[in-house]
Image (cartoon, rainbow, N blue to C red):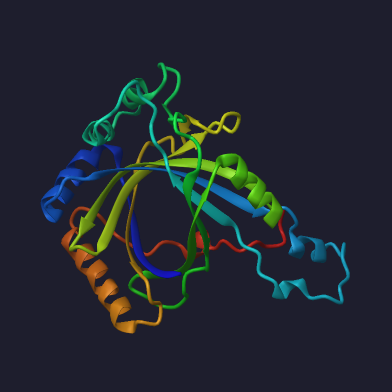
């Protein structure tokens, strides 16, 4: 369990290279590649929906039971003939050209990117459930995330989630770059791509047609009761916000969009 403090922004495609070069100068480091597969699972049975339709015994108040979406994440190893130097992957992302990216890392010119399944045995997955971010007037977003790492094959994972009463709802790829600022603030700049549901390994299209980039700056505090660490994390984010203020407008994300709780809508 961690307390994640964060700020977010968006970057116009035309400003991408300028922003990256500015962050290289600010952090004193070259970016690392970021490619993660994300799978969202939803409960098979929506208890609140059933109660709202009086489909179950109303003597039991199911509104007291909170159901949540579950996010499962793993690293996505791009397919390419032979071994690929990580710096080459970074350079392909820096090209800021998804058509070029498609031709370089896809298996042919019709696939934007394909996960390498050569060693697709057991995978390391991150299993996450998150609370809605704290309300009130704040300088940064503060959200509690419950996380555990599990090692499973893709087939075993699906069976495991089915036994928990969850079914896959959405699958997408995050592709981008990441920096570390002041040794504590993670900066991720990425785009989001849909993954073909038929094979689970082919990236078919970018979700945002404008091809703009998303930016997330965050600090994870391991002890959510450690006020001094939380205050320091807030100060570190505020310092980043100030230093990049003329370039990037960092702001608190909409907490409603980060609410993983299940309501009574199907």
Residue 253 place in picture, x, y as percent: 41, 61
User: Could you tell me which residue is drawn at 71 percent across and 57 percent down?
Assistant: 265
Relative depth, front residue between 31 and 98: 31
Q: In the picture shown, does residue 13 fall above or below 22?
A: above
Determine which quarter of the picture holds residue 137: bottom left
How many numbered markers are drawn? Answer: 0
Whether residue 165 is situated above or below residue 37 in the rendered picture = below
Quadrant for residue 261, please give it: bottom right
Residue 167 vs residue 249, the one in the foreground: 167
Q: Position of residue 38 (x, y in %)?
A: 49, 46
Q: Position of residue 234 (x, y in %)?
A: 29, 73
Q: Residue at x 57, y 61 (%)?
A: 260
| Front-most of residues 160 and 93 | 160
* Quarter holding residue 206: top left
204 left or right of 212 in image: right
In the image, what residue occupies the spot 66% across and 46% down?
A: 159
Q: Residue at x 52, y 68 (%)?
A: 132
Q: Is residue 103 above or below residue 264?
A: above
């Amino acid at each position: 369990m961690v307390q994640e403090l964060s700020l977010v922004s968006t970057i116009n495609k035309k400003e991408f290279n300028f922003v990256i070069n500015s962050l290289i100068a600010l952090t004193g480091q070259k970016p690392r590649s970021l490619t993660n597969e994300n799978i969202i699972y939803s409960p098979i049975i929506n208890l609140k929906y059933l109660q709202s339709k009086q489909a179950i015994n109303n003597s039991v108040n199911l509104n007291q039971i909170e159901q949540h979406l579950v996010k499962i994440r793993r690293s996505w190893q791009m397919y390419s003939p032979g071994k690929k130097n990580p710096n080459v992957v970074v350079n392909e992302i820096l090209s800021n050209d998804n058509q070029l990216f498609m031709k370089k890392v896809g298996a042919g010119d019709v696939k934007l990117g394909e996960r390498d399944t050569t060693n697709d045995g057991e995978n390391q997955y991150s299993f996450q459930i998150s609370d809605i971010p704290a309300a009130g007037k704040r300088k940064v977003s503060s959200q509690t995330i419950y996380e555990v790492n599990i090692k499973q094959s893709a087939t075993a994972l699906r069976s495991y989630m089915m036994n928990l009463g969850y079914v896959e709802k959405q699958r997408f790829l995050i592709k981008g770059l990441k920096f570390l600022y002041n040794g504590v603030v993670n900066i991720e700049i990425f785009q989001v791509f849909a993954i073909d549901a038929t094979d689970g390994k082919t990236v078919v299209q970018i979700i945002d047609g404008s091809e703009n980039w998303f930016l997330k700056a965050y600090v994870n505090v391991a002890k959510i009761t450690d006020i001094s660490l939380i205050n320091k994390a807030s100060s570190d984010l505020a310092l980043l916000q100030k230093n990049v203020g003329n370039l990037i407008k960092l702001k608190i994300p909409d907490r409603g969009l980060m609410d993983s709780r299940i309501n009574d809508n199907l």
